[in-house]
Amino acid sequence: MKKWILAVGLAILALPLGASAQSKDALVGTWKLVSATDTTEKGEKRDAFGSGAVGFLIYTADGRMTAMISHGGRKALSVPDYIAAPAEERAAAFATFTAYAGTYTLESNRVIHHVQIASLQNRVGSDQVRTIVKLQDDELILRTPPFLKGGRMVTTELTWQRLKGAGASQ
């Protein structure tokens, strides 16, 4: 009995502070972005993708994932042909939309996105690590490690809400 208690105690101590083992089943589904906040090293906070951002995050039971985020306030191109549109419009469209897909693995309180295709080619072949801050019922909060964005080191915290049913219009 004492060995069992010791083993359980050591297993708990081995988990990162605040972490809880997550089930892949709890992650599976389609999630809609509720909010995203960038925090600088100095503690300054701002909307990560502007007011009115829209995003979807999809995890499948067979280990596939897709993430897409559109900044708020995006403007349409002045012409329907995205190749013929003025370069500055195309640059703005590219800079205000991010998407990637691939596979994922779940490790304790982290989900790791193994990127196979992305709107930013530099991400292909990379692992995008997200700490699971909260995964409860229909709420998922993920946090990025610090990264360079616009010349500043930031950490982004993204809050997602699970969509229910095929006709969910949330």
Image (spheres, rainbow, N blue to C red):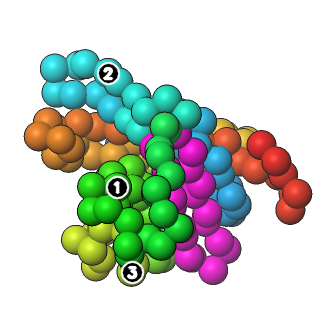
The secondary element bearing badge 1 is classed as: helix
User: Which residue is denoted by mark 2 in the rendering?
Assistant: 45
User: Which residue is denoted by mark 1 in the rendering?
Assistant: 89
Q: Residue at x 38, y 50 (%)?
A: 96
Predominant SS of the magenta segment = strand
Q: Residue at x 57, y 76 (%)?
A: 63
Mark 1 vs 3: CB contact within 8 A: no
The secondary element bearing badge 2 is classed as: strand
Q: Nearer the viewer, mark 2 or mark 1?
A: 1
Classify residue 87 by image quadrant: bottom left
- First reached walking from the N terminus: tag 2 or tag 1: 2
First to last magenta residue range: 53-71
Q: Determine the CA span between mark 2 and mark 3.
A: 31 Å
User: Which residue is denoted by mark 3 in the rendering?
Assistant: 116
Q: Determine the CA span between mark 1 and mark 3.
A: 27 Å
Position in image of residue 116 (x %, y %): 39, 80
- First reached walking from the N terminus: tag 2 or tag 3: 2
